[in-house]
Amino acid sequence: MAQVSTSAAQHRSGASPILFGTILFLASELLFFGGLFGAYYALRAQTTPWPPDGVELGTVLAAIATTLLVASSGTFHLGLVAARRERLGGLRVWTGVTLALGATFLGIQIYDYLRLTFEVSSSAYGTMYYAMTGLHGLHVLAGLVLMLIVLGRSMQGAYRGGNVDGLHAVGYYWHFVDVVWIALFATLFMVR
C-alpha cells in the first residue's frame, strides 16, 4: 500500500529520485569544473605570456573532436526517443553510435597528448591544460561506461513500458559532459 501511494505521489509531482539525484550530482560537478575554470583564468591573468612560448595546440583536431562529441549528444537523444517509443533496437543502435563517437573523441584526445610539445610540469599552463582536459576525459570515460550499462540493460528489457528515467539521467550526464567540453574548447583553443 505504501509503495502504491509513493508511486502515485511521484506521478502527481513529476519527481523522479534518479533524475533529482542526477541534477544534484551535476550541480556539484558544475562547481568542480567552475573551480578549474576559475583557477585557469586566475593563472592566465597573472602569467605572461599565456600560453607560454612554444605551446602549440592542434586546433583543427580539437575542432573535429568537438564536432564528434556534440554529435554524440544528438545520437544519444535519438536513442532516448526510440526508447520512449519502445523501440529498443533503435535505442541500442543509437547508443552504440554514441559510444563509438565518444570513444573516438577519447582516442583523439590521447593522440593529441602524445604529440603535444609541453608536459603537465612544464608550466602553470601545462598543469591547467592537462588537469582540465584529463579530468574531462575521465568524465567522458565514465559516460562510455554508462553507455555500456544502457546497452546491457536494454538487452534485459529494462526500458520497456516507458520506464526511461534512467536513460534521461544518463542523457543529462552526457549532455553536461558535452557542454563542459564546449567551454573547455572555447577557453583552451579559441580564447587562449
Image (cartoon, helix red, strand yellow):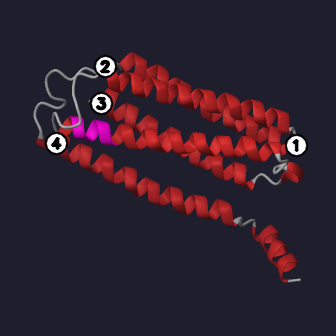
Q: What's the distance in space between the residues labelled 3 and 1, CA to CA? A: 44 Å
Question: Residues under labels 2 and 4: Cα distance?
Answer: 27 Å
Pointers 2 and 4 in contact (C-beta within 8 Å): no
Percent x, y for residue 32? Answer: 38, 55
Residue 66 lies left or right of residue 44; in this view the side is right
Residue 175 placement (x, y as % from top left):
57, 42
On residue 45, the disc is 4
- The secondary structure type at the circle numbered 3 is helix
Choose mark 4 or mark 1, whichever is in front: 1
Q: Name the residue under label 2.
A: 115
Identify the mark nearer the N-term, 3 or 4.
4
Question: What span is in magenta?
Answer: 126-131
Residue at mark 1? 86
Q: Which of 15 and 130 is in front in this view?
A: 130
Q: Is residue 102 left or right of residue 47?
A: right
Query: Cα distance, mark 3 to mark 4?
Result: 13 Å
At numbered mark 4, what does the secondary structure look like: helix, strand or loop?
helix
> Which residue is depicted at the point 26% across and 41% down?
128
Indicate which label's residue lies in the foreground, 3 or 1.
1
The answer to which quarter of the image holds residue 95 is: top right
Residue drawn 85% across and 48% down? 157
The quarter of the rendered structure image containing the N terminus is bottom right
Q: Which mark is residue 191?
A: 3
Q: Which numbered disc flags the more N-terminal residue, 1 or 2? A: 1
Quote the CA–CA distance across marks 2 and 3: 21 Å
- Sequence-wise, the earlier of marks 3 and 1 is 1
First of labels 2, 4 by sequence position = 4
